[in-house]
């Protein structure tokens, strides 16, 4: 390749050297001969030799830079080495594989790339065509904000944490009104018997601690030990035999709920084009108080219109297991997620399975359930986000098999629980976050409202 400007630049340097040498030569010709004059002339020659060596060095540098420029012009998009570029004048930015946002409002993305090591990780990725075919880098976009990371961990699991602890507080409210008819219809128009309007209001407070341990970056296990406080208010008409008089009774109870342990495995980490996929399994133990064999006590002076349970359950009484899959895709500042879970309840024998006086042993088969849900979250800034989601659980019928009797279904035991959830997540520090959620029931079997607060902590 013929170098452009190579010879003109060399000629210019040579002319400058000749012009610089002329005064010295003229001065040397005018010097008289003598021992002192010879020494002076020798010093002048050495100085000229040093200047000539400096000119040659500068000329070599100019020719090398000219070669780099010609190479860049011949190969489009080619870049020079950082060490070479550092010697050039002007500002220089090393080429990065991560996008740098032009909008100053998004400058925190760039800061997070540097803080979290995403720049270093991206530079270590193999160049296109130099690695294994089909491999896709984990991320070629700016690092997600803390709020987006917190939402993803809340939905998929907190992978990578060696040890963590979640403190959960929950509240649910149920309000159910029903009309009870005890009698018969005469002449298709007249009802003979008792009519009572019953109303049940229930409140459940839950203290829900969870401890988790990360075995690897893709697998972690956790254990949950809930504690419940329940209060139910029963109200009915017919006090003193008067249809207009009301009577009520409140029942309180508390105790540990059903302990559960679970494991989550990240099948595929999120990439630029594919979502994050996590499979989870959970086993539940009937450590809470079961709801079977609960005796109902008639409230005095209600003429049999109001009966209340002598105790309240804190668990469902049977062993259970669940298996689910969850997917999540980050489109910073947006996060989209969905999940599907199957709940299996195993049948179990009890000494008493009905509410009538006396014990009636038998087997209880609580219905299995399917649950699905989807939602999205949006990061408001680096430290906070809001989310919206919908979840629905379809519960099958419960069956009872009394001793020496046939198996029968419990009427009305099937359920359809649909809840709309609205949440907010706040990052309180590098190890602590605040996750809130408000649920609104959309079906008759759902709680009227529920509120949950979680404080996940990373050690």
Image: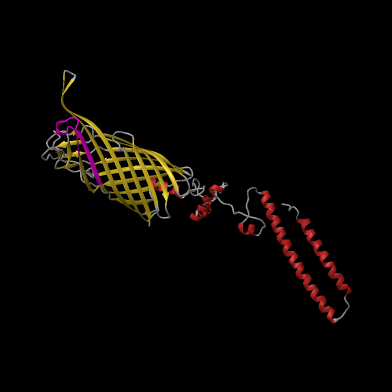
The answer to whether residue 70 is visible is: yes
Residue at (44% x, 47% y) in the render: 384
Instruction: Determine the residue located farthest toward the bottom in the rendered image.
Output: 35
Residue at (80% x, 73% y) in the render: 45
Residue situated in front as seen by the camera: 142 or 406:
142
Task: Name the side, left or right, on which 207 lies relative to 195.
Answer: right
* Quadrant position of residue 180: top left
In the rendered image, residue 245 lying in the magenta stretch gets the answer: yes
Q: What's the magenta bit mostly, secondary-structure-wise?
A: strand
Image location of residue 420, percent across then percent down: 36, 37
Q: Which stretch did the figure color magenta?
A: 229-248
In the rendered image, residue 201 lying in the magenta stretch gets the answer: no
Instruction: Determine the residue located farthest toward the left in the rendered image.
Output: 358
Image location of residue 281, percent across then percent down: 32, 46
Number of numbered discs:
0
Image quadrant occupied by the C terminus: bottom left
- What kind of colouring is applied to the model shown? secondary structure
The answer to whether residue 124 is visible is: no
Task: Name the side, left or right, on which 92 lies relative to 180.
Answer: right
Residue at (78% x, 73% y) in the render: 46
Task: Name the side, left or right, on which 330 lies relative to 66.
Answer: left
Residue situated in front as seen by the camera: 335 or 207:
207
Residue situated in front as seen by the camera: 107 or 64:
107
Task: Name the side, left or right, on which 326 lies relative to 103.
Answer: left
């Amino acid at each position: 390749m013929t170098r452009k400007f190579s010879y003109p630049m060399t000629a210019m340097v040579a002319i400058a050297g000749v012009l610089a040498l002329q005064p010295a030569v003229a001065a040397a010709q005018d010097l008289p001969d003598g021992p002192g004059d010879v020494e002076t002339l020798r010093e002048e020659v050495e100085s000229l030799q040093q200047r000539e060596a400096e000119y040659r060095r500068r000329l070599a540098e100019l020719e090398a830079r000219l070669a780099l420029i010609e190479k860049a012009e011949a190969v489009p998009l080619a870049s020079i080495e950082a060490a070479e570029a550092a010697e050039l004048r002007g500002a220089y930015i090393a080429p990065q594989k991560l996008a740098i946002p032009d909008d100053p409002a998004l400058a925190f993305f760039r800061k997070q790339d540097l803080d979290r090591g995403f720049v270093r990780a991206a530079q270590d990725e193999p160049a296109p065509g130099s690695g294994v075919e089909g491999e896709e880098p984990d991320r070629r976009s700016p690092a997600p904000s803390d709020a987006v990371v917190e939402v993803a961990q809340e939905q998929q699991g907190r992978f990578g944490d060696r040890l963590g602890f979640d403190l959960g507080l929950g509240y649910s409210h149920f309000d159910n009104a029903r009309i009870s008819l005890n009698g018969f219809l005469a002449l298709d128009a007249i009802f003979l018997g008792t009519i009572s309007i019953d109303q049940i209001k229930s409140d459940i407070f839950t203290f829900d601690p969870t401890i988790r341990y990360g075995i690897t970056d893709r697998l972690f296990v956790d254990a949950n030990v809930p504690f419940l406080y329940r209060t139910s208010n029963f109200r009915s008409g017919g006090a003193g035999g008067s249809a207009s008089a009301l009577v009520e009774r409140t029942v309180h109870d508390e105790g540990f709920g059903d302990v559960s342990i679970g494991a989550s495995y990240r099948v595929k980490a999120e990439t630029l084009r594919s979502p994050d996929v996590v499979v989870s399994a959970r086993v539940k133990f009937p450590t809470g108080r079961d709801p079977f064999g609960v005796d109902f006590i008639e409230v005095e002076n209600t003429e049999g219109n109001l009966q209340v349970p002598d105790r309240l359950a804190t668990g469902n009484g049977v062993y259970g297991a669940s298996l689910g899959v969850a997917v999540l895709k980050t489109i910073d500042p947006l996060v989209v997620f969905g999940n599907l879970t199957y709940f299996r309840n195993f049948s179990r024998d009890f000494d008493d399975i009905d509410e009538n006086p006396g014990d009636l042993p038998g087997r209880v088969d609580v219905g299995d359930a399917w649950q699905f849900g989807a939602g999205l979250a949006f990061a408001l800034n680096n430290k906070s986000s809001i989310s919206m989601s919908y979840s629905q659980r379809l519960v099958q019928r419960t069956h009872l098999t009394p001793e020496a009797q046939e198996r029968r279904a419990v009427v009305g035991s099937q359920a359809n629980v649909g809840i709309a959830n609205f949440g907010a997540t706040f990052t309180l520090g590098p190890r602590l976050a605040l996750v809130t959620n408000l649920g609104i029931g959309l079906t008759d079997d759902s709680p009227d409202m529920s509120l949950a607060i979680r404080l996940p902590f990373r050690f």
